[in-house]
Image: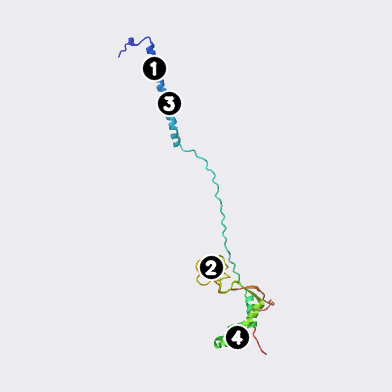
Amino acid sequence: MKFDLSIIPTTYDTVHAALIATVAGLFFLQFLFLLVAWLALRKKCKPAEARLEPAPARPAAAEAPAPVVKTEVRTETVVVKEATPDAALQLLGLLQKEARFVDFIQENIGSYSDAEIGAAARVVHEGCSKVFKQHFELETVRSETEGNRITLPKGFDASAVRLSGNIVGEAPFTGTLVHRGWKVKNITLPKITEGHDVRIVAAAEVEL
């Protein structure tokens, strides 16, 4: 293909200069538009890229130690004391001495009449009463009159009050006082001489 170089203008007039300036301006505007569009697109894509990147590992914050709750478990130790028989044997000896108590208990009363048993019981009662008055100071557990209605609060002393009848639920309980109970306020037993055998509650008797 041959080009006719004669059609190429050798001189530029005002029209040609305007066309060249217009083309150059359009090219610059297009380049500027593309640059702005590229910057806007990059700025718009940055947050998405940031979300895809894993977050930098942060040092684990020192967790506050959980509060230590001290639970005090109370265990009640039941101490079982072995009862010594000396005081009981001494009391039995006193009852035998003053009321012939052991003789009365050991006697077979089936062959005696009610009148004979009543007469013997009177002697035993008088002797036992004498022993109790001399060596024991007694008082009632409850001060109310027998037959009255009383209320036992929650936490009442079960060793001092015995419940009977229809026991349902938990305290407080309301019922009729049948017996006021007894408790020993003071006890004074005579001293025992060393070597005395308290198991001998009644010495054998020999008449010469």
Question: Which kind of residue does numbered mark 2 sit on?
Answer: Phe
Residue indicated by mark 4: 120
Residue indicated by mark 2: 173
In front: 167, or 76?
Answer: 167
Estimate how packed mark 2 is, as few (under 14), some (14 to 19) or many (20 or more) residues with alpha carbons within 10 Å.
some
- Label whose residue precedes the other's in the sequence (1 or 4): 1
Tag nearer the camera, 2 or 4: 2
Give the colour scheme shown: rainbow
The picture places residue 147, in percent across and down from the top left corner, at 56, 74
The picture places residue 68, in percent across and down from the top left corner, at 56, 52
Residue at mark 3 to residue at mark 4: CA–CA distance? 133 Å
Question: Which kind of residue does numbered mark 3 sit on?
Answer: Val
Residue at mark 3 to residue at mark 2: CA–CA distance? 93 Å
In the rendered image of this protein, does residue 123 appear above or below residue 49? Answer: below
- Label whose residue precedes the other's in the sequence (1 or 2): 1
User: Which of the 4 image quarters holds residue 92?
Assistant: bottom right
- Label whose residue precedes the other's in the sequence (3 or 4): 3
**Which circle marks residue 22 in the picture?**
1
In the rendered image of this protein, does residue 120 appear above or below residue 54? Answer: below
Estimate how packed mark 4 is, as few (under 14), some (14 to 19) or many (20 or more) residues with alpha carbons within 10 Å.
some
